[in-house]
Image (spheres, grey):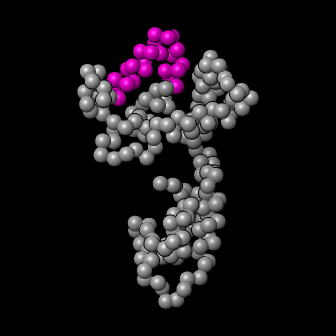
Amino acid sequence: MIPGEAAPNPEAIHKWSAREMYQFCVRNNIPEVWAYLWENWYCQERWKLWARSPCPDKVPVLTTTMIAESHFQKIKHDFLHYFNHPRLDLLVHIISQRMLQQYYVDLHTFLEETGRYSKGNLSWRPDFKRKWRTLEKVPQSEPFNPKYKPDALTWTCTCPSMRYSQFLICKHLIQHVRPVPPKFFLGVKRH
């Protein structure tokens, strides 16, 4: 899709794309924008999350449009809530001065060992714990219905409630595994 500019392999496409954006930032004398773009979009770890070239055999979980919309929604919510149509220079200033500082503060907080579970305060975890604890107490019909086939190793169940669950849990799976300690809910991750 990029004839003559890059070899048709993921590494060359990444190198070509990053070089093109870098040259644009150098031509326009905006090194802070390049720093932001490299840290959040073009470094190897982030590139794998949104670019299609590293994933030839599968569709990426996140699409570029979703990431861009989510990122701009954060900018609008946190920094631009008083501006309906912000000018480009204001937007660049907010990204390069205020938003990057917030990222550095968040990174420092995340990497610093405080001895508390401050890293685990995600907004969805209390709802997940409440739902899990509720489903632990729900009585199952006896005898066990074999058509649901819960499998804790693959975390699948064919019951209707699993299909509509926000967290992909159901009473069959939760009661199929041993009881979990409270510490489990501080480190559980979504996939």
Residue 186 visible within the image: yes
Q: Residue at position x 59%, y 48% from top?
A: 119
Position of 190 with respect to 94 (left or right) is left
Q: Position of residue 109 (x, y in %)?
A: 61, 39
Position of 76 with respect to 187 (left or right) is right
- Of 43 and 54, nearer the camera is 54
Position of 28 with respect to 154 (left or right) is right
Residue 107 visible within the image: no
Which image quarter holds the N terminus? top left
The residue most toward the bottom is 143
Tell me which secondary structure the magenta stretch mostly adopts. Answer: helix
- Of 108 and 190, nearer the camera is 190
Q: Residue at position x 61%, y 64% from top?
A: 129
Q: Position of residue 145 (x, y in %)?
A: 47, 84
Q: Residue at position x 59%, y 68% from top?
A: 132
In the image, residue 153 sits, relative to residue 20, either above or below, namely below
Q: Position of residue 151 (x, y in %)?
A: 41, 72
Q: Position of residue 39 (x, y in %)?
A: 48, 29
Residue 182 included in the magenta stretch of the image: no
Q: How many marks?
A: 0
Task: Locate residue 180: give its quadrant.
Answer: bottom right
Q: Residue at position x 34%, y 23% from top?
A: 16
The residue most toward the right is 82
* Region of the chain picked out in magenta, as a range: 14-36
Residue 21 included in the magenta stretch of the image: yes
In the image, residue 63 sits, relative to residue 134, either above or below, namely above
